[in-house]
Amino acid sequence: MARRGCDVCGADGYSSPSVTVDAVATRVRNGAIEALMIQRGANPPEWKGKWAFPGGFVDVGEDPLDAVLRELREETGVYGRNPTLLSVLGSPGRDPRKHCVGLFYRVDVDGDSKPSAGDDAVNADWVPLGMMDAENVAGDHIQVIGMISNAE
């Protein structure tokens, strides 16, 4: 007999990872590559105050391409366009809350945008890649910083 799923949320009794999206936007200022980052609030506590790419959970019924632009706007006030997949990270321990598969998208933004923190971010700013390390960056986002540092 097939499992019956919830008509509202799609839950079907299977234990599945959640899907998250993160917007990776960069610019060059004074010869340095900067990334549009947010400083995390209190959830999860392990990442409080650490830098992260703006992002969050994909809602039920939402396309990840729409979700990444929504999360960017909600957390930084910056509008993005043209998301293209950069990386997928899905190690079961990558998020202390639960198993999440993260889709990281390159997103075009106006390089002169002035970000302002919103949603669950306590700060939003353009941060030079050279100022970020494993101590001040949330989770595996440092791997993505390494990817974009090596590519540019």
Image (tube, rainbow, N blue to C red):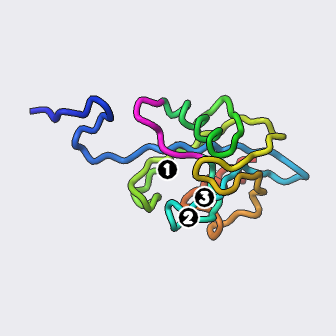
Say which residue label 1 marks. Answer: 89
Picture residue at 66% right of the left edge, 44% below the top: 24
Tag 1: residue type? Answer: Leu
Query: Quick one: label 1 or label 3, which is nearer the N terminus?
Result: 3
Q: Position of residue 56 (x, y in %)?
A: 53, 46
Q: Residues within 10 Å of mark 1 (few under 14, many from 20)?
A: some
Tag 3: residue type? Answer: Arg
Say which residue label 3 marks. Answer: 40
Query: Quick one: label 2 or label 3, which is nearer the N terminus?
Result: 3
- Measured Cα–Cα span from mark 1 to mark 3: 19 Å
Q: Is residue 129 magenta?
A: no
Q: Position of residue 108 (x, y in %)?
A: 72, 35
Q: Are marks 2 and 3 in contact (CB under 8 Å)?
A: yes
Residues in magenta? 55-62
Q: Is residue 96 above or below residue 26?
A: below
Q: Quadrant of the N terminus?
A: top left
- Measured Cα–Cα span from mark 2 to mark 3: 6 Å
Picture residue at 73% right of the left edge, 50% below the top: 35
Secondary element type, mark 2: helix
Picture residue at 28% right of the left edge, 38% below the top: 11
The kind of secondary structure the magenta stretch mainly shows is loop
Q: Position of residue 99 (x, y in %)?
A: 39, 54
